[in-house]
Amino acid sequence: MTEMIHKYPKVAKNEETKPFWDAAQEGRFLVRRCPACKEIHWYPRTLCPLCHKAETEWEEHSGEGEIYTWTVMRKSPTGPFALGYVKLDGGPHVYVRFRDGVTEGLEIGKRTRMVFDRISDEDVYLFADLA
């Protein structure tokens, strides 16, 4: 039996992340902010991972930041791709895949922005792209 190789993992949507993915369909990048400690965090979830309050709120973010660290995965059945952490302006680090074709020119401290590309009729996927 031949197993199909998927280039991108299935987007995991649930009630907690639905507003994020709905905004993503419109190209908007949302994060959660905790009104108690005032910090924004990533991955979006209701419970603040910093102070453990369960009252976080959605907030639109520019999606801009800088590369904190990165690596290129060269042994992939779908071709090389880059992964890394991006430190969002005024916020947390986001673990993200860089947009297809972005494996050269990556440098720690280089400006990036979060973008959404359509990967199927129903789904968009979050990528980082060089600013």
Image (tube, helix red, strand yellow):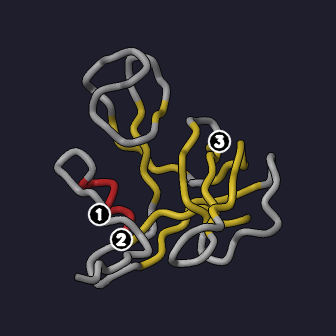
Going 63% across and 36% down the picture, which residue do you hit? Answer: 90
Decide: few, some or many residues near mark 2? Use Cα within 10 Å; few <14, some 14-19, many ≥20: some
Amino acid, disc 2: Gln
Disc 1 target residue: 22
Residue 87: mark in rendering: 3
Where does the image place residue 12, in percent across and percent down from the top left? 27, 57
Decide: few, some or many residues near mark 1? Use Cα within 10 Å; few <14, some 14-19, many ≥20: some
Q: Is residue 89 above or below residue 102?
A: above
Where does the image place residue 30, in percent across and percent down from the top left? 42, 51
Where the N terminus falls, by quadrant? Answer: bottom left
Residue 25: mark in rendering: 2
Amino acid, disc 3: Lys
CA distance separating discs 1 and 3: 23 Å
Q: Secondary structure at mark 2?
A: helix
First in sequence: mark 2 vs mark 3: 2
Count of picture labels: 3
